[in-house]
Image (cartoon, rainbow, N blue to C red):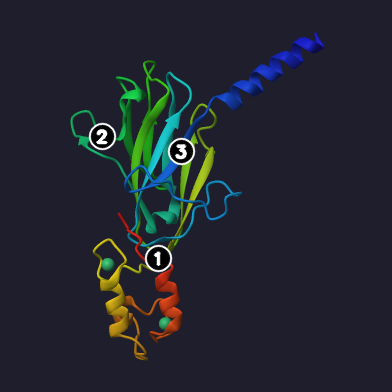
Amino acid sequence: MKNLVIVVLMLVFSSVAVGEVSTRVCLADANTPLELADPNVPFVYRDIMVGTKLTIIVDSNIAGSWSGGLFIPGSDREYGVLSGRDFNDVTLDWEGSHFDAAGDKAWVLDVNNMIMSGFDLHTNNTADIGEWFILDYKATNIRICTVDFYDYGFNWDIPLNSLEFSHVRTRDFNQDTKVDFTDFGLLALYWLRTDCNVPDRCSVTDLNDDGIVDHDDLMLFTEYWLDKTE
Ligand SMILES: [Ca+2]
Ligand SMILES: [Ca+2]
């Protein structure tokens, strides 16, 4: 009897471990992975500039019906936005946000309430192993923004994991989506100016907010040299 209990427990725990629907965070191209801040700490990603667009892909190594969601909780909604693709106003399905592998009756439903904003994600029994869903994310303000990933088969109320995005000031001063010589030219234009006060902060080239455009701002600027926000 004791052996039977152990076997049952092993089956239960192994099925929990095997049931893997997971998230993958990429740049806007939906292909290049966003690096972790520390390779040993999962779900905490490297700093990104305000204005940066990311993609969050949900993929699975199991087939069949599954339900879950991606949500930004509470006041984190002031710092980041999740969006779906190709809304169908008849079916209310964000039909561009699910892939064929999610099954022929997959659907993505936006949910906004007092405590969180995001999307419910559903597959059906024709779902196959592979990429199931894609949502877009945009960093809108400086601070950390959390995106909670729920697997409703695991728990309705507690996220399976929380993706953490840290947003820093943009270095794309002219807002053309890339950090390059044009932005460097703006920084050079304000070089050694000491009157860079809010709100303009010398076209936001005063990156550390000390009122002066100098070497410290140049160092911060070069950290994102040739980065793209989308
Ligand atoms: Ca630029
Ligand atoms: Ca400065």
Give residue 224's mark: 1
Near-viewer residue (48 or 70): 48
User: Is residue 101 depicted above or below 75 in this figure?
Assistant: above
To which quarter of the image does residue 4 belong? top right
Q: Secondary structure at mark 2?
A: helix
Instruction: Give the residue displayed 38% in from the left and 24% down from the top.
Output: 123
Give residue 96's mark: 2
Neighbourhood count class around disc 2 (C-alpha, 10 Å): few under 14, some 14–19, many 20 upward:
some
Q: Secondary structure at mark 1?
A: loop
- Give the side of residue 137 with respect to residue 164, left or right: left
Instruction: Give the residue displayed 34% in from the left and 90% down from the top.
Output: 193
Q: Amino acid at mark 3?
A: Thr
Ligand 1 within 8 Å of disc 1? The answer is: no
Q: Amino acid at mark 1?
A: Tyr
Neighbourhood count class around disc 3 (C-alpha, 10 Å): few under 14, some 14–19, many 20 upward:
some
Q: Can you tell which of label 1 and label 3 is closer to the viewer?
A: 1
Q: Amino acid at mark 2?
A: Gly
Residue under numbered circle 3: 23
**Marks 2/3: CA distance?**
17 Å
Residue 76 shows in the view: yes
The tag earlier along the polypeptide, 1 or 3, is: 3
Neighbourhood count class around disc 1 (C-alpha, 10 Å): few under 14, some 14–19, many 20 upward:
some
Q: Can you tell which of label 2 and label 1 is closer to the viewer?
A: 1
Q: Position of residue 56 (x, y in %)?
A: 39, 42
